[in-house]
Image: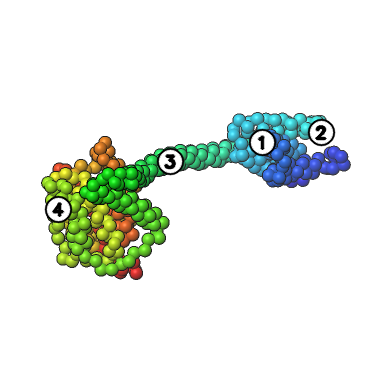
Amino acid sequence: MWSDKSNITFLNQDISILLRFTAGVLSFGLIIHDMWSKKFQYYQALYWHFTLMYSLSFFTSFLFLYNNGSHEWLINMALSLFLLATLVDWVSFVVLLSIGSSLGYWLNKLLLGENQLKIIFGDTHKLYLFLYVAFFSTLIGMLFSRNREHIQKSIVDFLEKRVKERTIELEEALILKKEFLTNLSHEIRIPITGIIAFCKGLYENWGNLSEEKRLIVLEKLNSAVDKFYTFVDNMLDLSKLDSGKVNLNLERIDIEELIKEVLEETDTLLKLKKDLQVQIKLEASSNTIDGDRFKIKQVIRNLISNSIKYSNNGDIIIIIKEGKETRDDGSIIRGLIISISDEGVGFPEEELDLIFNPFTPNSHIKSHLNGRGLSLSVSRKIVEAHLGKMWASNNKNKGATFYFAIPKDLKFEVEN
């Protein structure tokens, strides 16, 4: 709003034009603050508050008085108070308003030589109107400011919480990584040490060993090589399965037949446990599914071998039945559910969700046997690659049961 008092000049220019020009220059400086040199960027906060004081407090109060408190400048005053209350905290608001309005009043009195406050607010109606507008514009501005501060605090609290959560996750990941590498080193070192020891013993004592002892050492060497090969094979399988690059050679396979083949292969291990018996219970009208024969057999071998290894007596019961199972995403698996129950050491309840992680030890057997290595991790990944599900539970009396469910018509599910 231009002033009607053109008789007051400063450097041959209307004072209001000069004040507006100065406000524009200061505001433009804020717009291009990111172009400031590093030396001046240090003073940005001071420049910001000075600009607010000049543009919203000093400039507006001066022209409000200069124009005799007109309605137009009353509106400008209300907007300035609202913006100032919105942009700064209440302490800064009081300080900037006090300094700016005092300077505006002083400059106006210096130029006009008269007390404009008495002239403007001599009218009681004008005074009440000014107080009403000033109070509510300030109040609304502060409410906006408080709301903004609350939102900012909520965002900061949320970010701090996420940072703490991520920090904890990273710390846990580092611990898991360390444990994984330690277990990996342990799993590799044991068979390699055995292989080196057997080879060195044979080389250095070949002439002193009988044929029978040579065969015994060679059998142990072969066992160590098999364990190492199995470990490396599991590592490669786990890497492929994690990357999603596994290729399944789907064919129609008979689960009962695969189980019997695995039992024949583990017969030697089973005979060492004289008080251990294996039973197969068929509760399905059809035992065939679509799957990768080699990989499904690997799953069955891993589960049966573990049950034999960690059981000393009792029964290992293998049940094949038809049924439905719900995946983690809520979808339904319709197919065969195979369960393998033993009467071994079982698991602590809190570890049931962890046993499928690589190298997760069972605290029940940690003191005298190695952990389960990679076999359960690989088995679950293979089952999931077949769009199935694997899980475990403790038996009521003794031991644990492993389950895996696989769709009967996997080719149909993949195609659809």
Tell which circle, 3 or 1, labels the residue nearer the N-terminal end: 1
Please say if the residues under marks 2 and 3 sit with CB atoms less than 8 Å apart. Answer: no
Residue under numbered circle 2: 111
Residue under numbered circle 3: 174
For residue 45, the mark is: 1
Residue 180 point in image, percent of width and height: 38, 43
Q: Residue at x 46, y 39 (%)?
A: 167
Residue 110 point in image, percent of width and height: 80, 31
Amino acid on which disc 1 is placed: Ala
SS for tag 4? strand
SS for tag 1? helix
| 3D distance between C-alphas at marks 4 and 2 | 108 Å
Q: Closer to the observer: label 2 or label 3?
A: 3
Residue 13 point in image, percent of width and height: 84, 42
Please say if the residues under marks 3 and 1 sit with CB atoms less than 8 Å apart. Answer: no
| Front in this rendered view, residue 361 or 276 | 276
Residue under numbered circle 4: 278
Question: Is 366 situated left or right of 98 in this image?
Answer: left
Tell which circle, 2 or 3, labels the residue nearer the N-terminal end: 2
Tell which circle, 4 or 2, labels the residue nearer the N-terminal end: 2
Q: Residues within 10 Å of mark 1 (few under 14, many from 20)?
A: few
Amino acid on which disc 2 is placed: Leu
| 3D distance between C-alphas at marks 3 and 1 | 41 Å
SS for tag 2? helix
Tell which circle, 1 or 4, labels the residue nearer the N-terminal end: 1
Q: Residue at x 26, y 45 (%)?
A: 209
| 3D distance between C-alphas at marks 1 and 2 | 31 Å
